[in-house]
Image: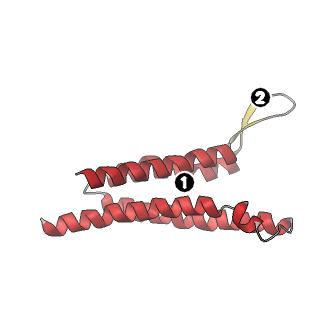
């Protein structure tokens, strides 16, 4: 089925894009400026886990008819947590430096939150397609 494959690829690409953004912004392997050695930063790694689960687990769960409901649920949980964490990060950062109003849109995590919700609605479309096919059988 072409539509399901296209939605699954879209879901994977959105999740992978979110993972790459998080790795670029919150790189958990930090170089020490003095010794030039890499060290692990556990707090930044936590922001990397959700998109990693999204890329691997959610995509894999959406591939099977038996686990698609779990994929939809896990995808929704990740998006809600991600939205709360990213919004909190933006609000804390922008209020701490009294940023102008335009920065609230241009320099916030609002575009990242948009990517997360696009990922969710792609998963919703996959789930709805599954239900439609299931009821037509």
Q: At which x and y percent is residue 57?
A: 42, 50
Seen in the image, is 85 located left or right of residue 57?
right
Q: Relative to the observer, which residue lies in front, 1 or 18? A: 1
Label 2 environment density (alpha carbons within 10 Å; few <14, some 14–19, many ≥20): few
- Most distant residue in the left direction: 137
Q: Which residue is mark 2?
A: 37
Q: At which x and y percent is residue 61?
A: 35, 53
Seen in the image, is 28 located left or right of residue 57?
right
* Cα gap from disc 1 to disc 2, whole angstroms: 26 Å
Label 1 environment density (alpha carbons within 10 Å; few <14, some 14–19, many ≥20): many
Corner quadrant of residue 102: bottom right
Seen in the image, is 135 located left or right of residue 82?
left
Query: Quarter holding the C terminus?
Result: bottom left
Corner quadrant of residue 88: bottom right
Q: At which x and y percent is residue 105?
A: 70, 66
The residue at the point 25 percent across, 57 percent down is: 66
Q: At which x and y percent is residue 41?
A: 71, 44
- Where disc 1 sits, the SS reads helix
Q: Is residue 26 shown to the viewer in this render?
A: no
Which of the numbered marks, if any, corresponds to residue 50? 1
The residue at the point 39 percent across, 61 percent down is: 123
């Amino acid at each position: 089925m072409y539509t399901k494959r296209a939605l699954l690829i879209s879901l994977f690409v959105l999740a992978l894009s979110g993972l790459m953004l998080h790795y670029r912004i919150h790189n958990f392997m930090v170089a020490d400026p003095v010794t030039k050695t890499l060290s692990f930063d556990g707090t930044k790694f936590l922001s990397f886990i959700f998109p990693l689960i999204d890329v691997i687990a959610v995509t894999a769960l959406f591939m099977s008819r038996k686990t698609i409901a779990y994929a939809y649920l896990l995808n929704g949980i990740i998006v809600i947590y991600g939205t709360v964490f990213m919004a909190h990060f933006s609000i804390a950062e922008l209020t701490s430096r009294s940023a102008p109003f335009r920065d609230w849109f241009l320099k916030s995590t609002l575009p990242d939150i948009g990517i997360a919700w696009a990922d969710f609605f792609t998963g919703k479309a996959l789930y709805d397609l599954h239900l439609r096919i299931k009821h037509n059988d």
